[in-house]
Image (cartoon, grey):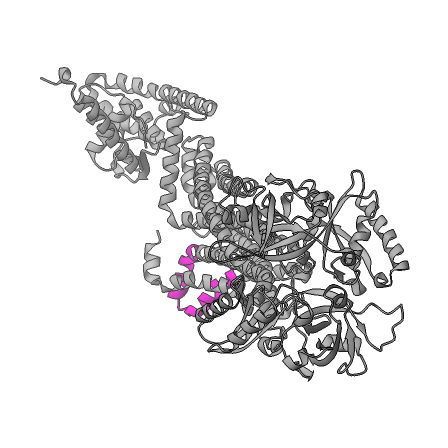
Amino acid sequence: MSGPGRLERLLLSGLDPDDVADIVRDVRELARDRGRLRRVWYWAELVKYPARLRAERLREWRRERHRHRTGGDGMDVLWRDVRWALRALARNPGFTTAAVGVLAVSMGAGAAVFGIVEGVLLRPLPIAAPERVVSFWLEGAEARRARMTPGNFVDLANVDGVFESVAAFGARTASFAQEGNPAFLRGSAVTPDYFRTLGVAPLRGRTFRADDADAGRPVVILSHHVWQQMLGADPDIIGRSVTLDGASFEVLGIAPPGVYPTEATVSAELPFTSANQDFFVLLRYGPQGWANRRSHVLGAIGRLAPGVEPDDAHARLAALTAELQAIEPLNRNERFLMTSFTEEVVGDVRLALVTLLANVGLVLLIAVVNVAALFALRAEDRRPELAVRTALGAPRARLVRQVALESTLVAIVSATLAIVIAHLALRAIHSLVPYQIPRLDTVTIGGAPLALTLATGFAVAVVFGALPAARIGRGVGGSERSRSRDGVGTRERRLQATVVAFQAALSVVVLVGAALLTRSYAELRSVDAGFDAHDAWVMSIPTRGEALQEITREVRALPGVEAAAVAYDHPLQRNWGDGFRIVGQARSDTDPPTSASLRPFGPGYFETVGIDVVVGRAPDEVDMAEEIGPAVVNETFARTFFPEGSPLGRVIEVPTAQRIWGSDGRFTIVGVVADVRFLGPRQPAGPALYVPLSHFPTSASTLLVRASGDDAALLAAVREIVSRVDPTVGVQEARPLGDILDDLLARPRFNMFLLAAFGTIGLALCALGTYGLVSRVVSTRTHEIAVRLALGARAPKVAGGVLASAARPMLAGMVVGLLVAGGLARTIESLLFGVSHGDVLSFVAGPLLVLVAGLLAATWPTLRALAVDPAVTLRAEP
Amino acid sequence: MGEVLGGFEHRVLLAMMRLGSSSYSVPIVRELESRTGRSVSPSAVYVTLRRLERRGLLTSRMVPVASGEGGRPRRVFDVSPEAIEVLREARRDFDRLWAGVDALDTP
């Protein structure tokens, strides 16, 4: 049989030549069935072909145009596409799990940390016009900040025109009488303008007025949570009485939950949570008390008057400083310092939180790159499928939409998981630092942080999901057929290598940061705080005199108790700084005022707390009974004030003790003890002066107990003794000294822990990316590997080649990462302790981890490739 | 997948299923004519085959033929798994629709 003739070719000229031959052959064959009319039928049928083809094309074109205009055939097409996308995702569980996992973890972590940053740093304080509120300090020698003295606060309050109001406050504790156990409350004694200055309105009742101070009747403002938890939110509480420290106070109002400054803010000893403020009473001093310019015991805040700029206030304070320095010898080396209140509340944690946020950003970036690469690779895998569908007339828009739908589904599932992860993360962070980060207690995941993080995740998934599809839809045609076996994957290999390099760089940055903070935390932990926190308990017992001595005696006799002593407070309290005079020492006016941390203690204190006596002795009860009491100083005190001679036997005078407590106020130095880092391991010790508690009859007192054995039994026994000896008080707070030390390390621990967590996530993502790359390399080179193995290449050499393909981009990325980390480490210098920002160990450990994780991730696919029998592989090749 | 088959497409696919593996227009035309008793245009079958292929319901490939037929390879078509799914769906729809339509029961 002959091929198509000239006329037939002319008739069928618009068709594929292969098809023309088929058609002619088929129609001829069928024509044979048609009997006499076969020649007519033959030509009649042939003529129909071009006509039908034209009609078919026209139909296609119309359908296409309709789809294009309406964006599909409505909801059922969308639904069909959704099911198509779900099925496509289910077919590839590896991809789906990786994409969802990466997105969910990074979005979840991002939302949690962003939520914290928003709640702690960005959200305005819950006070009126917080930017107008300022804090006041006295700045002494070496720019050392101190709290205000009552006398200097009066100076400040007398300044006209700059401040709308100023207020002072000091810490108070009180036992709150209720049925059963008396509760231990922390609160503040404040001047009447306190709430007005802060700009806080009472929830109920009213705040203090100037005449409350004059009236002399005891009044109290209770915190929201005390009202809620201890008074059952009694709606008629205003005007009723509550009993604090055995005295009756009339409840004036209820303060809203919020941020209240404490005098301890000077050293960040106590966090700024509302939980620290259980009550507010009026600060009362006699005329002598208000004239005191020695005792740095008050916190002070102010509100700028309308129209006054902070610069005006600074200038006015500078003038006041100059005035005082001229007339007040005690203020000769001190100047007024004014800072932003908001800054005081959050400034301390800003760098840490911003660092965290930056790390979350980096991890998010790693995740974005990872997810984008995952989608791009998946798109590459589907090129043939999509290309064929495009060639066969599937509208591109529809293909893009289907692929975009897939990535949208991934984003929706990831976002849902991310919300759960964010909540879990926040809860974990909360348990890590229950109250050491200001305002952390008010942070919730919601609103802007969540929306922003989820939007980012969505944008990433949808854009990166659909972009490759759009590109593929456009760039198809004859080229698909020419994609040879070895050609497959060159592009994706390059893409994947870039991804690995990028991830390695970012991971190195995060890990170096984590390593620096971990090292720094280890340094902090290893610092000798100057005392032995092990087995030591701190119990707050607000009683004094004979009762206190009796309690101490009985506790000492308890089984397991090695030592017990009373003191004003435990060794990790700043207490207060006070001025003193060294008797017999001539001082000129230009010498800096002598001032030290004043630390009232009882017999047995140094032994109980484990503070070493360096020179002289620790005073006993006999010493304490002397008319001129014994004093002990720390090494810094001895070095600072007795640079040449021994301090032993020298007498010092503490005027505050004379004026306020009416004692003699003179003490003989009998010993020098080791420095204790009162403010935690981070801050070196200042001069400290230990004086007998019996000469400072304050109501606050702390029982320190060193005991081994059962903690619960010890506490129960002490409680029993206290309630028997003085039924009006209880053991207010009992904590191991180690826990208190731990609290001081909570922020560095928080920084270290979170950065390490992000480092781990980054590392995992980096490993995932490397695994992807090597799998890719292996799958596209299976044939080549098989040939080489078949030809006798040694497996280790082949494996080395594969691993090198992963190691090269990783090394390149690590170099870049090290450079970036080197630049960034400087910015977190103030978070570091005992470790330089160029710490070699950290800069080696970070990249090493990345390298190990990457190579481990690369090993599995490499081994898989080598395990394949070359014969099987080669036979399977088409 | 909710693909809707046209009447002729439906018939062509069923004819191909009856014919078994890899077929081309000639046997399909003959099968359709012998089963329906109506004459069928090969051009209609050709256009339909290419359309079904475009929709992924058929796959085609070139196969060598005996030298008696001119020696040139020819295109043959196979029914894709998707098409079988679509046919099943169509049948289910028809069965459901027919159920209970007594008046039209064949005598």
A113 horizontally vs A135: left or right = left
Q: Is residue A439 visible?
A: no
Q: Position of residue A176 (x, y in %)?
A: 55, 55
Q: Position of residue A284 (x, y in %)?
A: 71, 53
Report the magenta residues as a range.
A779-807
A347 horizontally vs A17: left or right = right
Q: Quadrant of the N terminus of chain A?
A: top left
Note whether A654 is above or below A812 in the view shown.
Answer: below
Report the label total.
0
Front-lying residue, A667 or A323: A667
Q: Is residue A143 visible?
A: yes
Asked if residue A802 lies in the magenta stretch, the reply is: yes
Note whether A207 is above or below B96 in the view shown.
Answer: below
Asked if residue A123 lies in the magenta stretch, the reply is: no
Magenta-drawn stretch, dominant element (helix, strand or loop)? helix
Q: Residue furthest bottom?
A: A616
Front-lying residue, A55 or A708: A708
Q: Position of residue A367 (x, y in %)?
A: 52, 50
Front-lying residue, A326 or A143: A326
Note whether A53 is above or below A194 in the view shown.
Answer: above
Q: Position of residue A849 (x, y in %)?
A: 53, 65
Front-lying residue, B79 or A414: A414
B60 horizontally vs A146: left or right = left
Q: Residue furthest left?
A: B107
Residue at 80% of width from left, 51% of height from top? A156
Q: Residue furthest top?
A: B103
Note whether A562 is above or below A32 in the view shown.
Answer: below
